[in-house]
Image (cartoon, coloured by chain):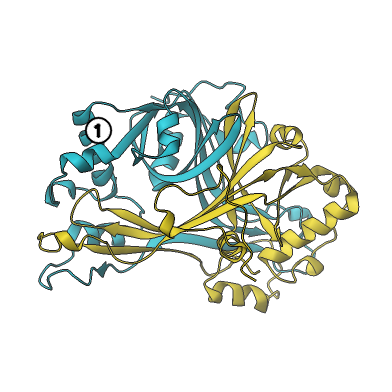
Chain colours: A cyan, B yellow
Amino acid sequence: MNQEFPVTPRSRVRRMHNRASHAWADVHAVLDAAPLCHVGYVIDGEPYVTPTIHWREGNRLFWHGSSASRFLRQIEGQRVCLTVSLMDGYVLARSAYNHSVNYRSAMVFGRAQRITDAQASAAALRAMVDSLFPGRWDTLRPMTAQEAKASTVVWMDIEEASVKDRTGPPGDPEDAHVPVWAGVLPMHTALAAAEAAPDMPEDLPLPPELGALIASGRLRGA
Amino acid sequence: MNQEFPVTPRSRVRRMHNRASHAWADVHAVLDAAPLCHVGYVIDGEPYVTPTIHWREGNRLFWHGSSASRFLRQIEGQRVCLTVSLMDGYVLARSAYNHSVNYRSAMVFGRAQRITDAQASAAALRAMVDSLFPGRWDTLRPMTAQEAKASTVVWMDIEEASVKDRTGPPGDPEDAHVPVWAGVLPMHTALAAAEAAPDMPEDLPLPPELGALIASGRLRGA
């Protein structure tokens, strides 16, 4: 109940800390709302940020890539900062200073590990597919041994984490008399109507669970 | 004409390099399509990734934050990797291995510098506002000296950069006979109908340039 990640010098939110939380549930909610994260790590003292799809089991995060990737080959044991951000709108105030963005973001810290066991890797890839499209894995052409070898799954346990968000209209009542339009331009990301592959036999309808995902307004199935 | 960023060990694209470009125009197009970037840098040997709004003049990128930010105070002269990613859809193939994402992403490297001159800082903040909402700066309550001091603008010249993208249907014709739905679930991010601030005098209509921005399907004005 109401479990929290430890607040450390790394994860303590200094600015606008009233908008922040370290609660597991709040961190999970942001991580689960977006399919895309940005993974930051250090190679030879220099920063790299790569976008990738993540998925989660409890406080363990997963992502994957090519086994030939220079990043994944060097990532074992490396400290990682994984950030997920959803932009929900522009906040237009009467002054430049009070302009803002409505958003949700999670910043998560841990140490990356590669999955080396073939069975564990296959199970993780199954969890990835089904976290995006529930039930899809069992409908697919089975993975070959060569395909399994070509993908590397990376995981990290969340050691520290924080989330921040902002919602609502501009907060500049002292300027309400200034004669300029103020308010929010909401920003939404959504899935649109499915486009069938041109080379697919015509009699295969869109599976109901994909139709449900599109209709849900969510960006991932689970 | 067709100018390119240098291809270095840092910026050379190893995986799927057929999807990659180092051309200025391609890098600029991705940077200009999104309001949000993820800035990665190193403090005491550890990686941090923070989301923020960026803007651009030629090959110079800008972002800003609170002058009290621990990040911005330590960023001067630091090497930065700034990444912009737009997810355009899920690509569902007949095998897990061939699933993919349609996307555009730019990874840009440089060295961060803070603007210390007050006039240059104000000019940059004006460029930020007008890059999102053309012409808005001149309609706002003017910035106070205190507000100007509270914001720090950071810039970096793009030293190395690469973009990658993927478009189109799944590329697994060898599996076209597998009886599972395949295709693309497009993903779109768009601005929605403006929400006026509750404390705004009722007679202020939405400025036409904001209406045009919403209708354009773009996420930033310039």
A57 vs A27, nearest the viewer? A57
Measuring 19% from the left and 52% from the top, which residue is drawn there?
A: B95
Q: Position of residue A123 (x, y in %)?
A: 21, 34
Is A56 left, or right, of B199 in this rendering?
A: left
Q: Amino acid at mark 1?
A: Ser
Kindly tell me whether residue A126 is visible in this rendering.
no
Position of the N terminus of chain B, as image quadrant, is bottom right
Residue A95 sits above or below residue B117 on the image: below
Q: Position of residue B52 (x, y in %)?
A: 62, 48
Residue B62 sits above or below residue A27 on the image: below
Q: How many marks?
A: 1
B190 vs B43, nearest the viewer? B43
Residue for badge 1: A121
Is A23 left, or right, of A119 in this rendering?
A: right
Q: Position of residue B89 (x, y in %)?
A: 37, 60
Graded by Cα atoms within 10 Å as few (under 14), some (14 to 19) or many (20 or more), the crowding at tag 1 reads: many
Kindly tell me whether residue B19 is visible in this rendering.
yes
Q: Position of residue B198 (x, y in %)?
A: 64, 61
Measuring 69% from the left and 52% from the top, which residue is drawn there?
A: A171
Is A219 left, or right, of B41 in this rendering?
A: left
Secondary structure of the residue carrying tag 1 is helix
Position of the C terminus of chain B, as image quadrant, is bottom right
Of all chains, the one bearing label 1 is A
Is A134 left, or right, of B31 in this rendering?
A: left
